[in-house]
Amino acid sequence: MFFVVRYVDALNTAIQFLPLGLIIFVITPIAVLLLPRIGSKWTLALGGTLTVCGAVLMTYIYQDTPYWNIPFASMILNSSGFGFIGYAAMLTGMSGAPPKWRGAVSALLNVAFQIGAGIFLAISSAIAQSTANMNVETSPPSELTVGYHNALYVQWDATLFPNRDL
């Protein structure tokens, strides 16, 4: 959205996305301390809630929305949620593995995260482009923003109601 809709160059887009990694770096040690106290179910729920709240904020981002108002706050919420989810999911997934298989289980979980993220991005991009009924190179930014918002609405639905038949 930053690169295509807001016409921000690649370097500035990368700089604006730095908080994602920095917040995960700060939140993961908090998740390490929190998980033994409240359990993996509540740690995952906290991470999911923060991530959904960040996605909700993203639907209020438009082409002219200043970076420090909503985009920055949504990145803080999303990356905080990812910090809680990543650690809790990895620890929960590896806790039942015998010691000799932990390396393989860790690799499998990492591959599953990467494949899931790729599928998630592909679905989101397809929804964004198809609902905006546009071509990324020629459509006005307002159409692209609507497409991104529609992709976020589908993501909310899948996150909040994962067992529902579509």
Image (cartoon, rainbow, N blue to C red):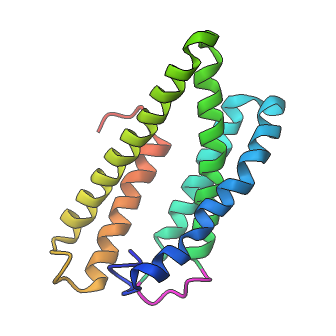
Q: Is residue 1 left or right of residue 135?
A: right
Q: Is residue 65 magenta?
A: yes
Q: Which is the main secondary structure of the residues drawn in magenta?
A: loop
Looking at the rendering, which quadrant does residue 35 occupy?
top right
Q: Is residue 100 above or below residue 72?
A: above
Q: Residue 87's quadrant in the figure?
A: top right
- The residue lying at 41 percent from left, 85 percent from top is 8
Tell me: 83 left or right of 148: right
Quadrant the N terminus occupies:
bottom left
Q: Is residue 88 visible?
A: yes
Please state, as top left, top right, bottom left or bottom right, where the C terminus lies in the image.
top left
Magenta run includes residue 95: no
Q: Residue at x 36, y 53 (%)?
A: 154
The relative height of residue 31 versus residue 138 in the rendered view (above or below) is above
Residue at horizontal 55 percent and vertical 22 percent from the top: 103
Segment tinted magenta in the rendering: 63-69
Question: Is the residue 79 above or below the residue 19 in the image?
Answer: above
Name the spot of residue 101 as percent of width and height, x first.
55, 13
Q: Quick check: can you spot residue 49?
A: no
Residue 13 screen position, x and y as percent: 46, 78
Task: Judge whether 114 appears above or below 91 on screen.
Answer: below
Given residues 121 and 133, the one toward you in this image is: 121
Residue shown at 64%/12% (left/top)?
99
Q: Where does the image place residue 93, in percent across and percent down from the top left?
A: 58, 24
Relative placement, left or right, of 96 versus 134 is right
Taking depth in this image into account, of 162 and 16 the one nearest to the observer is 16
x then y, percent, for residue 112: 42, 33
Along the line of sight, which residue is nearer the eye, 130 or 100?
100
Which sits in the foreground, 44 or 117?
Answer: 117
Q: How many numbered marks have been drawn onto this rendered protein structure?
A: 0
